[in-house]
Amino acid sequence: MNLIIKNMYRRKSVRRFTEKQLSDEEIIAIVEAGIQAPSGHNAQSAYYTIVQDRDLIEKMNQMAKAEMQKSEVDWIKKFGASERYHLLHNAPTVIIVSAKDDAYSPVEDSSAAIQNMLLAATSLGIGSVWIGLIKFFLHLDEAKEMLNIKEGYTPLFAVCFGYENIEVAGSKPIKKTDVYEWIR
C-alpha cells in the first residue's frame, strides 16, 4: 500500500490535545495542503483564519455552547449544557475555513480543502478534528467581526489541530466495509 493511502487509513479525529503549540511552519504546511485542494470551476474559494488566541478560542466555545442549548435536537442541547464538553477540544490551534459568497460550490470547496488539511496534519504527526457544530457560533452577527473574516466570505467550519495527548488517546473507530456494490 502506498504512503498516501496508509496515511488515509491512519487518520482519525483527535479530541484530546497537549498544550504544546504547533510551529508556524507546520501550520503553513497544513494550510498550503488545503490550498492545493480542488474547487468547483477552479474558484479557489476557501479562506483560512488561523486562531491561536486561547481567550478567543474559549469565547467561541462558550458562545457556541450557549446557542447549542437553544437547539431542538436533544443531543446538541445536551452537549451545549455540559460543563465538561469543550466544542473546540481545547486545541492550541483552530483554523476557521470560510468560502467566497459567490462561489459555485463553497461547501464542497471548503470540504475538499479540509480533507487535505486533515491528511497533511496526520502525515506530520499532528492530531486534528473537523468541527461542524461551530456553525452555532459562526451564524452569530459578531462572529465575522471577532474572526476578522474578509468581506464577501462566509465562515463555514472549524478544524482543530494540535499534538494528541497520548495518555488519554482515543482509538480510531472501525469503518464499515459493506457500503459499496459493483454495477458492471
Image (cartoon, rainbow, N blue to C red):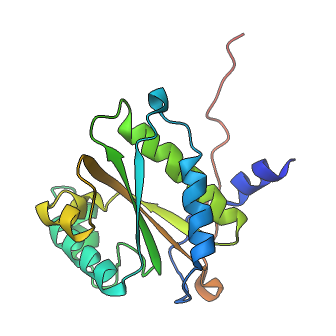
Q: Nearer the viewer, residue 64 or 45?
A: 45
Q: Nearer the viewer, residue 103 or 83?
A: 103
Q: Quadrant of residue 25?
A: bottom right
Q: Nearer the viewer, residue 183 or 132?
A: 132
* x, y percent for residue 89: 42, 77
For image coordinates 61% across by 34% down, the residue present is 179
* x, y percent for residue 43: 43, 34
For image coordinates 57% across by 80% down, the residue present is 22
Horizontal relation, residue 108 to residue 141: left or right: right
Question: Number of callouts in the render?
Answer: 0
For image coordinates 27% across by 50% down, the residue present is 154
User: From the viewer's perspective, is residue 130 above or below residue 161?
Assistant: above
Does the image show residue 143?
Answer: yes
Check the picture and name the quadrant holding the C terminus.
top right
* x, y percent for residue 95: 43, 65
User: From the viewer's perspective, is residue 60 above or below residue 58?
Assistant: above
For image coordinates 54% across by 85% down, the residue present is 21
